[in-house]
């Protein structure tokens, strides 16, 4: 899942709500990946 880090780099402060949701989902997927 290296593409997650490549696609969603460092989030900025000027994100719209949809982008924040995408970053949150990506972060959750990365956390789950760490446990598997």
Image (cartoon, rainbow, N blue to C red):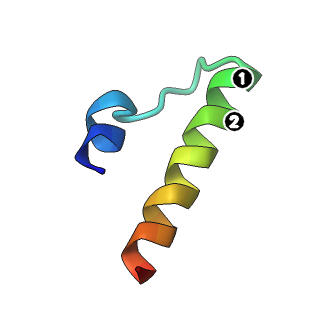
Residue at the right extreme?
A: 17
Q: Which mark is residue 18?
A: 1
Front-most of residues 3 and 10? 3
Q: CA distance from mark 1 to mark 2?
A: 5 Å
Q: Quadrant of residue 35?
A: bottom left
Location of the C terminus (image quadrant): bottom left
Report x, y in % for residue 17. 75, 24
Report x, y in % for residue 3. 28, 38
How many tags in the picture?
A: 2
Q: Secondary structure at mark 2?
A: helix
Q: Residues within 10 Å of mark 2 (few under 14, many from 20)?
A: few
Report x, y in % for residue 13. 56, 26
Compared to 19, does 28 lie above or below? below
Q: Quadrant of residue 15?
A: top right
Compared to 11, does 33 lie above or below? below
Q: Residue at x 24, y 47 (%)?
A: 2
Marks 1 and 2 close (CB-CB < 8 Å): yes
Q: Quadrant of residue 22?
A: top right
Compared to 23, does 33 lie above or below? below
Front-most of residues 14 and 18? 18
For this view, does 20 lie left or right of residue 8? Answer: right
Q: Which mark is residue 8?
A: none
Q: Residue at x 72, y 23 (%)?
A: 18
For this view, does 9 lie left or right of residue 18? Answer: left
Q: Secondary structure at mark 1?
A: helix
Compared to 25, does 36 lie above or below? below
Q: Residues within 10 Å of mark 1 (few under 14, many from 20)?
A: few
Q: Residue at x 51, y 46 (%)?
A: 26
Residue beneath disc 2 = 21
Report x, y in % for residue 16. 69, 17
Q: Residue at x 26, y 34 (%)?
A: 6
For this view, does 24 lie left or right of residue 36? Answer: right
């Amino acid at each position: 899942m290296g593409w997650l880090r490549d696609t969603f780099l460092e989030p900025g402060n000027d994100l719209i709500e949809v982008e924040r949701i995408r970053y949150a989902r990506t972060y959750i997927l990365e956390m789950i990946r760490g446990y598997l």
